[in-house]
């Protein structure tokens, strides 16, 4: 009788243990079966295996394919839109293309996802990540430190400009630096149709650093140059060795500087890179390589058990910062409903074209969509993707 009772208790305990939630899931950390694509391959899964209605997701992709941007494929309007170019501009680009990643797996892709094309201001979110890495490595002690504390090339010198001496790394990362000057032939004031095309701005008084938001590539390019001087090696090399190689990206991407952006660092000539392709150059990359970067950010900076970028940086970079609602550290947020049907916790890297990396932590999604109409079309696409998820997914 006792033996029968003992066996029954033992069987019950074993059954309970087999049904229990794994410890990792209980703590809210990544589940044991998280998939990271190895270098050179990426597994596809049937959408239904990952919680999607096959037909609805196929309809969403078909809709996206019809949203081709009106930007000419030969970049013939580049100068009219942005002004005089300083760096290379391709002769052609791919048609609209994209990939949808859920739980690390590809559930849909379309178009030339391996085409290496300019990404415009998507590059700013990469520079944000390099800034975070710089802080992680201790090259910058605090994001609130004045840049002048580290950089002594005249760009922030109190003797030359007491105004610029007040600029902090946070100001640069939130587009509130109000850094004043000319860099690589472009003045920070953005005045002049020949230099800035339709992006020309009206004259205004310069404000105190930290008190005014302005989306301004010259100032981001100044931050990029400052990071180059701290690392003492070209930022494309930093991006490659510290981020893109560890996550298995291809070797096809390239980060172009302007033709006149060579500077001297410790006696060596090095090319500084920009935060976009507004004046040529910039980060040229395939959709699938962008998707790896997006997955790294979704996984809070960890890849196959290796810490690439601190979780604290990613949390801060993708949270409201500075003065502009819905803007972090060079990432666009959905806190104010930029994409009305998407979770408020989702965020994106955005560039002209339109080029985008959208990340939705609530649904474990990364969506890279290239050369689309942007604006309301972007929100509509995310709405259609989310509507394709089964109830409870």
Image (tube, rainbow, N blue to C red):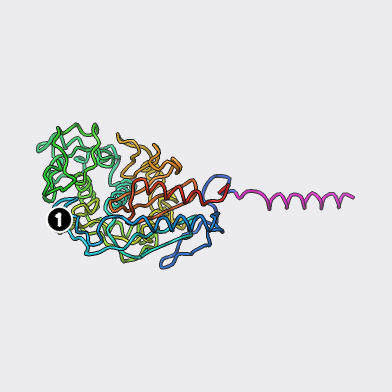
Front residue of 100/41: it is: 100
Specify whether residue 124 is painted magenta: no
Crowding around mark 1 (Cα neighbors within 10 Å: few <14, some 14 to 19, many 20+) is some
Q: Is residue 143 above or below residue 125?
A: above
| Segment colored magenta | 1-22
Q: Position of residue 356 (x, y in %)?
A: 35, 52
- The number of numbered badges drawn on the structure is 1
Specify whether residue 15 is painted magenta: yes
| Residue at which label 1 appears | 86
Q: Position of residue 293 (x, y in %)?
A: 38, 55
Q: Position of residue 329 (x, y in %)?
A: 32, 42
Front residue of 378/322: it is: 378
Front residue of 276/62: it is: 62
User: Would you say the magenta stretch is mainly helix, strand or loop?
Assistant: helix
Residue furthest left in the image: 160
Relative placement, left or right, of 82 versus 251 is left
Relative placement, left or right, of 389 versus 367 is right
Residue at screen point 90% across, 50% down: 1
The quarter holding residue 40 reads bottom left
Relative placement, left or right, of 327 versus 205 is right
> Circle 1 — which element?
loop
Residue at screen point 18% across, 46% down: 198
Front residue of 193/266: it is: 193
């Amino acid at each position: 009788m006792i033996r029968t009772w003992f066996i029954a208790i033992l069987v019950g305990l074993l059954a309970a243990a087999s049904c229990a939630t794994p410890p990792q899931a209980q703590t809210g950390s990544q589940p044991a079966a998280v998939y990271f694509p190895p270098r050179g391959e990426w597994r596809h899964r049937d959408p239904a295996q990952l919680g999607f209605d096959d037909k609805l997701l196929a309809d969403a992709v078909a809709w996206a394919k019809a949203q081709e941007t009106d930007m000419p494929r030969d970049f013939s309007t580049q100068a009219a839109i942005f002004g005089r170019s300083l760096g290379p501009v391709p002769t052609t680009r791919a048609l609209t293309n994209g990939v949808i990643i859920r739980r690390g797996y590809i559930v849909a892709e379309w178009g030339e996802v391996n085409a290496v094309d300019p990404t415009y201001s998507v590059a700013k979110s990469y520079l944000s990540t390099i800034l975070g890495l710089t802080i992680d490595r201790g090259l910058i002690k605090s994001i609130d430190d004045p840049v002048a504390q580290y950089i002594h090339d005249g760009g922030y010198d109190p003797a030359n400009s007491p105004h610029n001496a007040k600029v902090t790394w946070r100001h640069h990362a939130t587009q509130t630096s109000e850094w004043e000057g000319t860099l690589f032939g472009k003045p920070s004031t953005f005045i002049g149709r020949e230099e800035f095309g339709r992006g020309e701005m009206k004259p205004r008084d310069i404000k105190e650093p930290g008190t005014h938001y302005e989306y301004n590539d010259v100032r981001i390019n100044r931050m990029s140059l400052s990071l180059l001087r701290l690392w003492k090696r070209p930022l494309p090399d930093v991006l490659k060795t510290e981020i893109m190689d560890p996550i298995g990206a291809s070797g096809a991407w390239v980060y172009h500087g302007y033709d006149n952006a060579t500077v001297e660092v410790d006696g060596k000539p090095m090319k500084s890179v920009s935060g976009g392709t507004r004046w040529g150059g910039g980060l040229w990359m395939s959709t699938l390589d962008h998707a790896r970067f997006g997955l790294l950010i979704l996984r809070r900076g960890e890849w196959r058990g290796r810490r690439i970028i601190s979780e604290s940086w990613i949390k801060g970079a993708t949270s409201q910062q500075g003065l502009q609602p819905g803007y972090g550290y060079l990432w666009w947020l959905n806190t104010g409903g930029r994409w009305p049907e998407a979770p408020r916790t989702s965020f994106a890297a955005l560039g002209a074209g339109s080029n985008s990396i959208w990340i939705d932590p609530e649904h474990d999604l990364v969506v890279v969509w290239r050369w689309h109409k942007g604006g309301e079309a972007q929100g509509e696409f995310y709405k259609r993707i989310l509507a394709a998820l089964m109830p409870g997914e």
